[in-house]
Amino acid sequence: MKAQHTQIARRESSVPSRPTRTIELIGQQSLVVESADGGDLLKIVAPDGRVRLAIAMTVDGPVLELGGMGLMIRSSGPLAIDAERIALHGRNGLQLSTGGDATIRVEGDLTSVARIQNISASLGNVNVKANDDVRLNGERVMMNCDGEPPPSHPG
């Protein structure tokens, strides 16, 4: 999928294509429609030639590619994404936030891996509940401790 995603704006076909149509838009941008037997490609192209939006209409459905410095999706109502699998990756970070409550619910196992993990409650409890055992494994399990751990004493 990734190769297709990065290549739809520069699609080349060995099958002869139908004529390309171009419509001039505001700000010297243009809408380009390319058609070939493998599918249709709609592109919004900036004045410098960079593709800002590309939609490839394939027999399997549309493939969307956005180019630019940022992207915002805004809805005054609910926004739902439904797919077989979803992957989010932030090259320099990832932040999820809400003004209300948040829930993560999975049918299988949930794994969280990081260099350091911090769990805190700004007001109220941190509650941990398990149907079976609760296991804490560490070099030292410290409770009610602030600051640095005491020095280790050789045994």
Image (cartoon, rainbow, N blue to C red):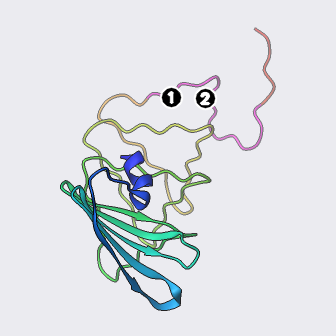
Residue contact at pointers 2 and 1, CB within 8 angstroms = yes
Dominant secondary structure, magenta? loop
Q: Which residues are magenta?
A: 135-149
Task: In the rendered view, tell whether residue 75 sits above or below residue 107.
Answer: below
Q: Is residue 115 magenta?
A: no
**Which residue is found at the position 24% from the left and 48% from the top?**
84
Number of dots carrying numbers? 2
Image quarter (top left, top right, bottom left or bottom right) of the C terminus: top right
**Which residue is found at the position 78% from the left and 30% from the top?**
150
Q: For residue 122, which quarter of the picture?
A: bottom right
Dot label at residue 136 = 1
Where residue 61 sits: x, y (%)?
21, 59
Q: Residues within 10 Å of mark 1 (few under 14, many from 20)?
A: few
**Which residue is found at the position 21% from the left and 58% from the top?**
37
Amino acid type indicated by mark 1: Leu
**Upstream in the sequence, badge 2 or badge 1?**
1
Position of residue 73 in the picture relative to residue 14 (left or right): right
Q: 53 or 32, which is in the foreground?
A: 32
Q: Residues within 10 Å of mark 2 (few under 14, many from 20)?
A: few
Dot label at residue 141 = 2
Q: For residue 60, which quarter of the picture?
A: bottom left
Position of residue 140 in the picture relative to residue 22 (left or right): right
